[in-house]
Amino acid sequence: GPHGYSSSPVLVNDLCVLQVSHGGPSYVLALDKATGANRWKVDHPSQTGWSTPAVYVGDDGPQIVVSTAGSVRALAARDGATLWVNEAISGNSTASPTIVGDL
């Protein structure tokens, strides 16, 4: 895309989380903050996205919320498991998600 990758990393407990989303192979990657070793990597649909993930901390622990053109999804910080997905989004929907309270 014209903005490059542009997604900033976020820190979640002992992880550094990156979103790589574009027209090619896309994924969310969690690295160990201390060593840089891959802790988990989750493939993501090839969708344009340059937003920074948001972190929501709920009763079940931290979630990483990522937004790309066409979807918003939440992953469990502990292992990258998909917790929920909303694909009923159209247009240029790549703004960074915002957490307010429990929403």
Image (cartoon, helix red, strand yellow):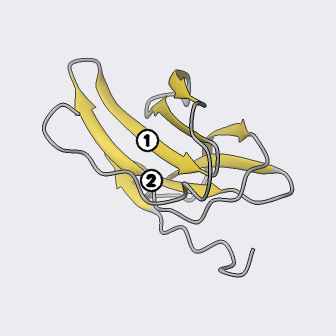
Residue 39, position as x, y percentages in the image: 58, 41
Could you tell me which secondary element the residue under label 1 belongs to? strand
Percent position of residue 67, x then y: 52, 48
Q: Is residue 65 above or below residue 82?
A: below
For marks 2 and 1, the one nearer the N-term is: 2
Classify mark 1: residues with Cα within 10 Å, few (<14), some (14-19) or many (20+).
many
- Of 78 and 58, nearer the camera is 58
Give the residue displayed 49% in from the left and 31% down from the top: 75
Q: Amino acid at mark 2?
A: Pro
Q: Which residue is mark 1?
A: 65
Position of residue 45 measured from the top left corner of the image (x, y, whole percent): 75, 40
Q: Nearer the viewer, residue 89 or 10?
A: 89
Residue at 38 percent of width and 51 percent of height: 97
The answer to whether residue 99 is above or below residue 84 is below
Which one is in front, 90 or 77?
90
Tell me whether circle 2 and circle 1 mark residues in contact (CB < 8 Å).
Answer: yes
The residue at the far right in this view is 24
- Quickly name the residue at label 2: 53
Residue type, mark 1 in image: Val
Viewer-side residue, 37 vs 68: 68
Where is residue 6, by image quadrant? Answer: bottom right
The quarter of the rendered structure image containing the C terminus is: top left
Vertical arrangement, residue 48 with respect to residue 46, above or below: below
Say what secondary structure mark 2 lies in. loop
